[in-house]
Each structure stands twice: as structure tokens, then as C-alpha cells.
Amino acid sequence: MNKHLSYIFIFLLIISLWSCDKGIEPGEPKGPGGFSGKVTFIGNWPSGVTRTHLVVFKNPIQSSDDFFPPNLTFVADSIPYRTTSFEYNSFENNFIPIFQLGYGNFKYVVVAQSKTQNLSLDRKDWYVVGIYCINNDQSKAATLIVEPNKITPNINIVVDFNNPPPQPPM
Amino acid sequence: MKINYSHKLTILLLLFCSIKSYAQTNSIKGKVISDKAQPVIGANVILVGTTIGDAANEKGIFEIKNVQYGIYELEISAIGYEKRKVSNFRVNESTKPLTVVLKETAFETEQVVVSASKFEQRVEDLTVSTTIIKPDYINRRNFLTFDDVLRYIPGVQMNLEQVSIRGSSGYSKGVGARVLVAINGIPLYAGDNGDVVWELIPLSDIERVEVIKGPASSLYGSSAIGGVINIITKSTSKSSLFYFKSYIGTFDKPKHTEWRWDDSYRTFYGAELNHSNSIEDFSYTLSLKKFDNMSYRQNDYSKRYLAHLKLHYNFTPENYLMFFSNYLYSNRGNFLYWKNSQKALVPKDEETGNYVKSNRIFNGLIYHHEFNREFSGELKTSYYRTQFDGYGIEHTTSIASLFRAEFITNYIISNKFTLTSGVEASYADVKSNIFTNPEFFGSGAYIQSEFKGVKDLIVTTGFRYDYIKLDTTAGKNAFTPRLGLNYKYSDYLIFRASLGTGFRAPTPAEVFTTAGVGGGVDVKQNPNLTSESSIAFEIGTQYKPYENLFFDFAFYQTDFNNFIEPNLTKDGDIQFINLSKARIQGFEAITDWSILENELKLIFGYNYMWARDIAKNRAMKYRPRNIVYAQLKYSPTPFDFGIDFRYLSKVEEIDFALVEPPLALVVDGEKRVPIFVTDLSASYSFLIGSAPIRLNLNAKNIFNYYYVEFIGNLAPLRNFSISTEIYF
């Protein structure tokens, strides 16, 4: 029994010493990052549009649940109806101030439009009209990389009303 | 030859007479008292190796007469106390009276009667896992509030102030407890948010704590879906008894200089005076306590006063009336989340200076009547009034009054069949600017039987019906049946199994809260919230291969429907919603090993738990998979030394919505680690006159491990304290 007791003592001692002054440590100070760019519109605007926003999602939308926070991470100010181009900066044009972009990789950045009178975060009330993409191929979404304390430039999106992108699942 | 024999016989007779005439004797007199200075009636005092001894009388006094001069070893024992030996006790003409102090046993595993099932049962007869805690452990460890005690019970987990038994709760600021905490069987949950305020529990008046693991709704109704913690207060003293305790302690400074926000050492201190006495059939206990804590964190201070009164009147030895009242005043800072991990001991800017003042009074009245030996009844009524005012960006306020009455009958139909039944009703009235002004009404009726008709088998069946009506929401019904089996295979091996159901009605706070939690995020009402329900089973065994070694194993599973948890809504607000389905499965093993009788003891507990949201197939928030507790106690009288160790694996799921963009309400809130905490304790007991005194030294989190139980809340740093207890 004494032998077993020694093992228990040794086990507890190792575990305890291993934990000395360990655990959570202060992280590196990291401020929020941002991004900027231009949205260009080609073609005629559809009628009845009540709001148009540039919207950032952490991951591509797989279901309607992905259309709202926490996957939805940023909404830019509303783009005026029939605008041909809109320059933005995420720090200056944050439509929902309590939403903080922070930093990291964001895999689905789109321009979306809605025709509802009141603001809704239901997927069915929105349709995507432009995607931040690779080589103008709207079927291949590009990843927005935001680093702490930096503004990532040239996040440009072309909205071609004559050539709408694929819609994410409802 | 004849001359030879008669000569020898004469010499022997002469020797015998001379021995007899020179064998001087004296009495061993003394007193056996408990470490609370109370006489230990019936304590056995024997001379080791003989059958000579005596039993202590009603004053704890004993006398062993005609003991020949010499050196002896005395053994003193009594049920419920640790056995003691007094070595090298010399009996001669100057032998003085002896005072022996017996300590109550700390953790009990058998031969203890519990009443959490609303009638008295031996622990070994129970059909569910149960742990009993005795007050000695609480005092020796200098736990300041009751929630600290619970952190060291296998299968029980604390997330800040919220208790969880086998994963029943995550964290929701104490709102909507799933473990029913009761004092003398009377539930102690507030009328508005259903939380338990641990500071309201008078630690100095605890006789024992019964922790029932698993749903107990079939007896206790809503809130007992995860288990029951029943706190039994002490019997009032038969003679005048004072108890005084004071303590002072300090927190160490953090290793990381970024965290040092105050150059001075932060302290905590308190004092308590307790008096108990009897006048014929009337007895009382009164205690006053003040306890302050500067805290290791900024704006996390607390200043509290607790008053506890208990009155007891015996009409006859079997029929009594008991009244108790606890009053708590609290003024504390309101630390919600750290600023960030660089400023982990400082609150967010908008929370600096926020504070909460509260007044709470909890009154209970119990009348017990035995109609005859077989049939008894008990009426339990209570009134719990809570009031708090939170001062911050907004002023929040709530006043809740909760009235409750329960009538229990216990009928011993035969020595094989016992029937327990009861009815209860409760009503709550809330006036609040965050919970609106809802009313709550609940009623229930239950019946439970214990059948011992088959040799070595105990069958327990129970059923309860509840009706709950919360203000304007539709009334809800709940049926909660239960079945339990206990089979005593041998004196060393006991099997148990139980299948039970539970339910929990949403509290007014979960349905009606409308408040800001900072960062522009609000908590919103959900009038559509419905009751959650559960079905649980457990199989377990107790195995005692040796007198000093005890094992308890249990497998358990609980399935929840409509599990209520706070969630982020589509509008970016927090709302309590019903999850579709959740399942918790686990295994628990507890060992209690007295390595050296009454001197060296090891308690080891391990709990593996897999708690998951079935619909989303992911872990439930704030439930660690592995929990280990180890307690080693070495008690060479008059000292006590203890090491307590606990390990909780890193929780997989937290409130990511509050931590990650876009809300990022708690900066660096994702920082979490496995928990390793080691505590050391040492006690020295001695007498001044006949007054037992104990000095306790405690070093908690001795290796200064930094961890969180909840996002953005660094747990207490290494701290040291000294406490003194005197009974007179």
C-alpha cells in the first residue's frame, strides 16, 4: 500500500509542479483590422430594391443559419439606389457599430440586396448580386485577409446585374 | 514430598497476598467532548487489549475504576466521530482527569442517515449516487462561501457561481438553476431569476450536506432536474455554547506584470459569533457574521453581513416546531468580463464603478408531528424575499417575494413498506424593471414508496404531478415518475439502478428579462419558452473489499428535451431558447481509502462526461469531459494536514458568439485552459481550559495556476489565509 501511496504522491507532485505559474497568459495586444475598396455596378438596377449592402461572412453560406451572426461579421453602410460605384472603408462605413470585424480570414464577401421595408436578417429576404472573387469568376469566392492594426486595400467587387452570381442555399 | 508441596503453597499464598496488598489502583476519569465542545454521549473509552472501559454519560463524563498503576493505551470511539487513541497514559496516585476531543468524520460513505428523499434512509440503501459532507471539512479548509465547498465534490462542477451536477448546467449567470439547493428540505431559489445565493447559507450551522446526483423532480419538482443539494442544520445545543471564528487572508500578486493593477496585497477577512442554548424544551441558535473581500480583481470587492436565527421548541420528544431565518446584506462591485487578456484583472471600461446592493431574507418554518410510531407528518413553509439594485449605465432593480408551503406524510405500513407523500404550492410576485412584473404559481403532489419485501432488495417507486403557471404564459403540466433498485449482494457489494424523469419550468428571468449586457447587446424576452424535460438512468455499485477501502462506480445518461440555454438571435441579441435535444453520458468512480486508520486518508474521484447538443452534434457549453478530484489527509493528533487537487479538462464549447466577431464582446474570451488547482491546509487543535481551539492555515491554488471557469473571468490567484475557531 505504501508503494501505491508513493505513486499517488509522485503523480500529484508532477501534476502540481507542472502547473506552477502556468495557465492563461496575457496575449499580444492586437487592435482591430479593416479593409477598403470599391464596388462597381454594371447594368440596370432592379426595381423595388430598398437596401444594398456589402456584407462579410466568416464562411460561405451552407444554410440559412449561416446568414446571421456569428457567421455574419460585418455590414457596410447602405449603398444608394442606382449608384454606379461606391468606395468604402470598413472603419468609416460600419452600418452596425456593435459588429466588430476584428481580424482573421473571411471567406465570403458579397454585395447583397433586399426589397423588404424593414431590415431583416432572414436569408430568404436577400439575394446576392456580387461576390469578391478570384479572376472575376463569381463561382470562386476569394478570401479576405484582415490583419490586426492594418487596413487591407483593394477589396473590389463588380456587380453585373446582367450576369448575377450563384445564389447561396436558402 | 508433602512438606515440599505445602511449603510451596504457603509461599505462593504469601506472594499472592503481598501482590494484592501492593497492587495499587486509581480511576481513569475524564470527559469526551466533540470539537464543538459538546459532550459526546455514549462515547466508549476502553483500555486497549482489555475489555475494561466505560461509556460517557449525558455530560460526556466517564470513569474507569480500579485500574492498576501502569502505562496504558486508551481507545475512544463514538459513531459519527473519528476514533482516537491516547498512548502512554500513566495511571498512578497523581493521575489527572482526561479531556478527549473527538472530531466529526468529514466524508461519510455508509451508516449515515440521509433525508434528501424526504424520509430517513441509510446512504447504503439509496438508489442514486450520493455524497455526504460533514462540517469539519468545511471549517478546516476555511471555505468562505458554500459554493467553494462544492468545487471539491466528485461529479459537481462550479462555473463561477452556477452549480452543475454531472453536466446539468452550463453558465447563465445563475439564472434558472438545474440543481435544487435546500436548507432542511426547503428550496432556496429566488422568486425572480431562480438563482441560489451561496452567501446566504450559514456555514457554521451545517450538520451535514447531502448531494444527490441525478434528477429528483419526482420528489422536488422543477429545478431538481440535475440533482439536489440538501443542507441540514445542526441541532441546537443542550447547554450554553459560543462559537467564534475569525479569518484573514491575502491574494498573491500575479506573475505577469501586465496584470498588476494594484501595488498592495489584496485581502479578505471576516468574523463570526454563534451562540446556542436551551431552556427546557426551547432552544435557539443565533449567529452574526461579517465578511469582506477586496478581491484580486478591480471592482470585484464585496462587503457582506449575514444574520442567522434558529428557534426550536419540543412539544414532546417527537413533536417539534422549528423556525429559522437568514438575512444577508451585500454590497459588491460588478465585474462581468475582463478588459482583455493583457488587463485580465481589470473590468471593461464601461463596467468600472458598477456595483450591486442587495438584501435577502429567507424564513423557514417546520412543524413535525408524529401521530404514532408508524405515521408522521411535517408542514414546511417558507418566505423568501430578495431585493437587488444594480448601479451602472442603467439602474436595474428587482424585488421578488416567494411563498411556499409543503405538507409531507410518512407512513410505515410495515417493516417492509414505507410510503411518503406530499403536496406543495408556491407563489412568487416580482416587481422589476428588467424582468417586468410577472407572477408565478406552482403546485405539485407526489407519492413515493420504498419496498423491502424481497431479501436484500430495495425497490423505490415515485411519481409526481406539477402544474406551473407563469404570468401570461399558458399553464404547464408535468408528470415525473421514477423507479430505483438497490440490491445488497453481500456486506461488501451493493448494486443500484435508477430510472427517472425530470422537468424544469422556465424562470421569470428566462422568459421576461429585458436588459443590456454591454456592447449594445440586449437580453430579450421569450414568452414562447417552454419547460425542459429529461429522462435519466444510472447504474452503480458500491464495493468495500476491506474495512478501510471503499469504491463507488456509476454509469449515467440523461437525455434532455427542450433544454433551455441563452443563445444569440438573428438580431444580435441574447435570448433564452429551447434547444431541441441534448444528451449527457458519463462514468464516475470514487475511492475512499483509509491508508492508516484515523490518520491517513485518500479520497479520489474521477468523472468522464460527454455532453452534447444532438441536433448540432457538438459539445454543450462549459462542460469538461474529464474531472479529477484527489484529497489526501494526514491527521496525527492534534494536527491535520491536507492536500486537495482538482483537474478539469479544457471545455470545448463556450459562448463563441460573445467572443468572436462580429460582437467580440469579451476580448480574448476564447482563452481557456485545462484546470489544475492544488490547495494545502494545516490545522492544529488544542485546549485552553476545556475550550477547544483550532488554528487553520490554508494555501489555495498554491502553484498560482491561471485559469477561467467562465469566459473573461480569471479564477482566484494563489491566496493564503489563517483562521481561528474557538468553542466556549
Image: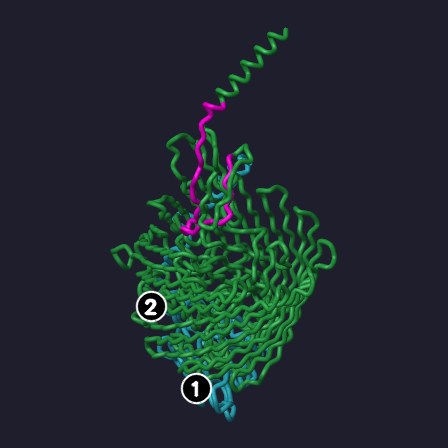
Q: Amino acid at mark 1?
A: Thr
Quarter of the view holding residue A40: bottom left
**Whole-percent x, y for residue B445 in the image:** 61, 75
Asked if residue B533 can be seen in this view, the reply is yes
Q: Residue B33: say if magenta.
A: yes
Q: Quadrant of residue B539?
A: bottom right
Q: CA distance from mark 2 to mark 1?
A: 57 Å
Q: Could you say where residue B449 lies in the image, as x and y percent from the top left?
A: 67, 66
- Inspect the image, locate mark 2, and give the three-letter code of the amino acid beneath it: Arg
Dot 1: what SS?
loop
Q: Is residue A128 visible?
A: no
Disc 2: which residue: B332
Q: Residue furthest bottom?
A: A47
Residue span colored magenta? B20-47
- The residue tagged 1 is A84
- Chain painted in green in the figure: B
* In the image, residue B528 above or below residue B590: below
Q: Position of residue B221 (x, y in %)?
A: 58, 72
Q: x%, y% of residue B535? A: 64, 68
Q: In which chain is the residue bearing label 2?
A: B
* Residue depth check, mark 2 versus mark 1: number of the one nearer the observer: 2
A74 or B246, which lies in front? B246
Q: Mark 2–mark 1 contact, CB under 8 Å?
A: no
Find the residue positioned furthest to the right. B454
Which image quadrant is residue B245 in?
bottom left
Q: On the picture, is A78 further left or further right than B610?
A: left
Label 1 crowd bin: few (<14), some (14–19), many (20+), radius 10 Å: some
Image hue for chain A: cyan
Between B340 and B214, the residue placed more toward the observer is B214
Does B57 appear above or below A49?
above
Mark 2 falls on what kind of element? strand
